[in-house]
């Protein structure tokens, strides 16, 4: 009986070789690893605002996305607003899901796991007594965030759970949400 | 069962002031006090504490201003001896060492159950103090067992703390004062600053409270306050009653070596996590202070007093380091004690009456909480003065008048 070693080609659309190469290059050049991400935001009236992201700093120089991306944010009609976009809160939830999802794709690629579909649902609970200033004991932000992944992949349940756990360990947005950050607000 | 027209619960500045008013109006009453007269001021304060209000603002009803210096600050020991003097002068009917177990409705009036028996009465005046229970966050229980915990009610003096660093949580009057005292004692203090107010002790040749008095900020009645809920939760003025008239702000604390950081957000596996909002908290406190100074300046120019007082000045902004610390591994950082200077609640747990709001606070209208039920000494009960020593007399007069009018109406009916 002959045993044939199985060679599978995994493609999650992530260029792991390039990422690992970048990791190696950056560990030699700490300055290049310092990135600054930016967004600009302009008031459109009422609760409606439009953010634009285009340039960022990294690898020691100014960089640009292939094009400028814009995001409209607003409040829903329940708050007497125009509902011209997602709420900033929903953007935070989306950012968390997107960050973890990108991480899952990379980790799975690196571990040779083919993904067929990754779907996430995120929920954030919030008591309006905080932002409305009704009760100082209620925080303004989410009291809890839940994210659930539904993943179809060529892997065991445990392997998938391990991929998700690892993506959480390396997620920038997960870190931003779960740990404090110094924030400075200034007026020009 | 013993009977009285009125039972006053608590023999502090409010209870004694009310007793004086009722005696003057011929209303028979008894004061029930869990310990000795002024017990909270005897046992629930730290050793060095002086009143934040100068002597001219700290007289008890019917008494002269304490001390020789109107701008001096009375030690709490002296306040307690003045309580004793007031009680003797008015012959206050105080039942000391009597703890109230419950106050419940009974017939037309109330039944006050104490550990020395029950008293039936028509009126109850709750004057048991605003600062009975420290508001300690739930995550306090997650502190490592090796870290000693104190509140401003249990903290007495630096030497009671284990050697090592101290985390002081909260930067209103108590937190600022205790942080200063501990740092001066040679301990390294880390101060976690949440909501914060800033105020100079003196401005333009006068105590800041003189100016606030002249601007009539202390006299606005509760019925005129924009958002009474909000003003009622404003903490004590961030001042220290120190003979040197020193200003106690975050710059002064940083000058002596206190490390300042953001609000304590939680404890996670022995690690304290601090909010990154310090810069914003400090900027807001500076803006608010400057608005107050502008109001004072406008008042001074409006009255033409400019030439007679020091010129207007603005103080350096609160210094915030580039990267305030966001966490501390308490044990590794040598922090051996935590002081919870995070505010207080009154203890009204023994009030068995349907008078509470959803947050467990007694609902009241300027101290009137129900038929014959009164509460005193709470923040902005009737004016901002309600928590000052000299606010007790005014509030007692207004509420005694209400109480007597109600008795008269019932007799007439």
Image (tube, coloured by chain):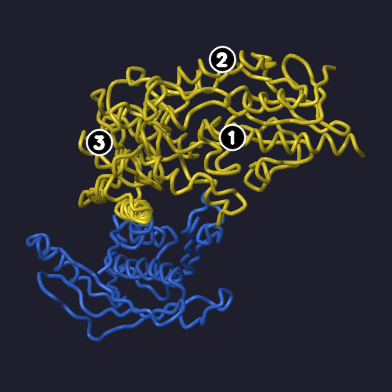
Chain colours: A blue, B yellow
Instruction: Provide residue B328's location: percent of width, then percent of height.
Output: 29, 40
User: Could you say whether the residue bearing mark 1 is in a helix, strand or loop?
Assistant: loop
User: Is the residue at mark 2 from the same chain as the one at mark 3?
Assistant: yes
Q: Which mark is residue B258?
A: 3
- Disc on the earlier residue, 2 or 3: 2
Q: Please check whether the numbered discs 1 and 3 fall on a single chain.
A: yes
Report whether B136 appears left or right of B277.
right
In the image, what residue occupies the spot 40% across and 33% down?
Answer: B174
Disc assigned to residue B84:
2
Q: Position of residue A8 (x, y in %)?
A: 29, 74
Q: Quadrant of the N terminus of chain B?
A: top right
Q: Tell me the residue at 11%/60% (across/down).
A: A27
Residue B60 in percent (x, y) is at 54, 26
**Image quarter of residue A41:** bottom left
Horizontal relation, residue A135 to residue A107: left or right: right
Mark closest to the chain's N terminus, 1 or 3 = 3
């Amino acid at each position: 009986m002959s045993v044939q070693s199985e060679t599978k080609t995994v493609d999650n659309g992530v260029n792991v070789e390039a990422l690992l190469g970048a990791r190696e290059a950056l560990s030699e050049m700490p300055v290049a690893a310092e990135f600054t991400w930016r967004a600009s935001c302009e008031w459109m009236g009422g609760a409606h605002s439009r953010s634009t992201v285009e340039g960022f700093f990294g690898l020691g120089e100014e960089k640009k996305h292939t094009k400028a991306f814009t995001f409209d944010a607003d409040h829903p009609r329940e708050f007497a607003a125009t509902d011209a976009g997602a709420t900033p809160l929903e953007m935070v939830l989306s950012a968390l899901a997107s960050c973890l999802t990108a991480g899952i794709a990379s980790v799975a690629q690196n571990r040779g796991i083919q993904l067929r579909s990754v779907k996430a649902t995120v929920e954030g609970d919030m008591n309006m007594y905080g932002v409305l200033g009704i009760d100082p004991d209620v925080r303004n932000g989410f009291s809890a965030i839940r994210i659930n992944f539904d993943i179809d992949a060529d892997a065991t349940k445990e392997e998938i759970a391990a991929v998700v756990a690892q993506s959480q360990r390396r997620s920038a947005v997960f870190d931003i949400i779960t740990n404090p950050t110094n924030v400075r607000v200034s007026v020009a | 069962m013993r009977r009285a027209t009125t039972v006053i619960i608590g023999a502090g500045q409010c209870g004694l002031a009310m007793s004086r008013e009722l005696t003057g109006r011929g209303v028979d009453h008894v004061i029930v006090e869990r310990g000795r007269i002024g017990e909270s001021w005897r046992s629930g304060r730290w050793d060095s504490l002086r009143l934040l209000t100068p002597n001219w603002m700290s007289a008890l009803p019917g008494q002269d201003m304490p001390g020789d210096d109107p701008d001096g600050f009375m030690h709490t020991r002296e306040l307690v001896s003045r309580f004793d003097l007031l009680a003797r002068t008015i012959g206050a009917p105080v039942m000391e060492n009597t703890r109230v177990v419950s106050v419940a409705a009974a017939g037309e009036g109330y039944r006050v159950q104490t550990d020395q028996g029950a008293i039936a009465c028509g009126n109850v005046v709750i004057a048991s103090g605003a600062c009975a229970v420290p508001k300690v966050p739930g995550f306090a229980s997650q502190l490592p067992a090796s870290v000693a915990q104190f509140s401003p009610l249990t903290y007495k003096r630096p030497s009671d703390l284990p050697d090592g660093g101290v985390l002081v949580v909260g930067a209103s009057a108590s937190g600022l004062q205790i942080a200063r005292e501990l740092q001066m004692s040679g301990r390294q203090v880390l101060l976690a600053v949440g909501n914060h107010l800033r105020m100079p002790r003196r401005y333009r040749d006068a105590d800041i409270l003189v100016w606030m008095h002249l601007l009539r900020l202390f006299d606005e009645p509760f019925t005129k306050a924009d958002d009474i809920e909000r003003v009622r939760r404003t903490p004590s003025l961030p001042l220290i009653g120190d003979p040197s008239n020193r200003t106690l702000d975050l710059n002064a604390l940083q000058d002596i070596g206190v490390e300042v950081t953001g609000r304590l957000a939680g404890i996670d596996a022995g690690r304290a996590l601090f909010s990154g909002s310090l810069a914003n908290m400090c900027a807001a406190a500076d803006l608010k202070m400057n608005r107050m100074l502008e109001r004072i300046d406008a008042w001074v120019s409006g009255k033409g007093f400019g030439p007679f007082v020091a010129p207007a000045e603005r103080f350096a902004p609160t210094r915030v380091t580039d990267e305030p610390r966001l966490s501390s591994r308490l044990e590794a950082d040598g922090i051996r004690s935590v002081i919870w200077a995070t505010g207080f609640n009154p203890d009204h747990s023994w009030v068995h009456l349907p008078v509470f709001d959803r947050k467990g606070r007694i609902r009241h209208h300027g101290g009137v909480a129900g038929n014959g039920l009164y509460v005193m000494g709470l923040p902005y009960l009737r004016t901002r003065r309600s928590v000052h020593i000299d606010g007790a007399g005014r509030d007692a007069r207004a509420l005694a008048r209400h109480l007597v009018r109600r008795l008269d109406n019932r007799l007439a009916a």
